[in-house]
Structures are given as C-alpha cells and as structure tokens.
Image (tube, grey):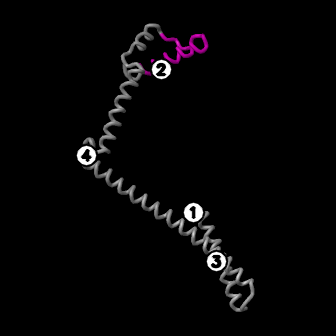
Amino acid sequence: MGSDGKCLLYVLDAVDCCLAVTGKPSSYSVPPDSRKLYVSSPTSPLDSLRSWSSGALLVAQQYVGEHLGRRMRTLTDPETTAHVGALREQQRQFVHLLQLATSLSTQLQNVVQTQRCLGDALSELSQSGGDVPLGEQFSSSSDTLKLISKNGETLMSKYV
C-alpha cells in the first residue's frame, strides 16, 4: 500500500471530519470502494501506536539496563565507541571550563566590590582631615580605585 495509501487514508479522515463538523460532505470526491479498501487496512492507527510503544519500551529498558550494568551495551562498533568516548571527554572539558569561567566571574565581582568599598573608605579618610600630604594621597588613591571599580563593572555588564 505504501505512502499513497496513508495519504489517502488521511484524506478520508479529513472527509469524515468535515462531514461530522459541518453536516455536509466535503468537496473531495472519493469512490466508495476505495473508502472500504483503506479503512480496513491491517495497519490501523491503534496498531501503529501499539507497535511504536512496545518498541519504545524495549529501547528504554535496554538503556536503563545498560546504565545500571545489568545488560551488555548494544554499541559494539569500536570506531563509534571511540567517537562517543571522545565526545564525552570533550563535554567533560567544556563543563570544567564553564565552572572555571563562572568562578572567575564571581571572583571578579568580589574584587570590583572590594575596590569600590576601599575607594569609598579612602575618600572618607581624605575628607576627614588629618595630615595634608597623606589626605591628597588618599584622595588620589580613592579616585583611582573608583575608576577601576567603574571599569570592572562595565566589563562585568558586557560579558556576564
């Protein structure tokens, strides 16, 4: 019967649906003999669903059995096994790289926050009076740390 039979079966279902919804037959003209031929096909949608679900269940059982160590692996091709192993190793390396990048990002955020707090503290010290040359150095250092903190925040906002 092939794919033409399936297409015609879908057309017949659409004709039946149109008849049920509108109460009028569809504009498709289907000979009555062909309707009986395709509706009585041995591969009904229920049969295809039943065969698909049993196949999916077998695949799932095999997969779980392999991962629990109760069944032998179905993949016996050494080239494919090596390729899968290389892909797993590459995935492990990428996950490690992601962890390192996340750690670096967190540390950079902490450094930027510490620089901002240090700049604020130096600014307060420079304004509180005290020794004049030391106050100028505090003010200069405060401005530098605030600028570095601002640049760090700009960097973090672009890449995080």
Q: Residue at x 38, y 29 (%)?
A: 53
Residue 10 visible within the image: yes
Residue 71 is one of the magenta-drawn residues: no
**Residue 26 position (above or below residue 140):** above
Q: Mark 1 = which residue?
A: 159
Task: Please state the horizontal and vertical placement of residue 143, each as a whole percent of the image.
Answer: 68, 79
Label 1: element kind: helix
Report the side of 118 relative to 132 (left or right). Answer: left
- The mark found on residue 77 in the picture is 4
**Residue 39 position (above or below residue 109):** above
Q: Residue at x 40, y 19 (%)?
A: 44
Report the side of 145 relative to 53 (left or right). Answer: right
What's the amino acid at mark 3? Leu
Q: Mark 3 = which residue?
A: 118
Magenta stretch: give its range: 5-30
Question: From mark 2 to mark 4, how far is it between C-alphas?
Answer: 40 Å
What's the amino acid at mark 2? Tyr
Mark 3 neighbour density, 10 Å: few (under 14) some (14–19) many (20 or more): some
Residue 20 is one of the magenta-drawn residues: yes
Q: Quadrant of the N terminus?
A: top left
Please report whichever mark, 3 or 4, sits nearer to the chain's N-terminal start: 4
Please report whichever mark, 3 or 2, sits nearer to the chain's N-terminal start: 2
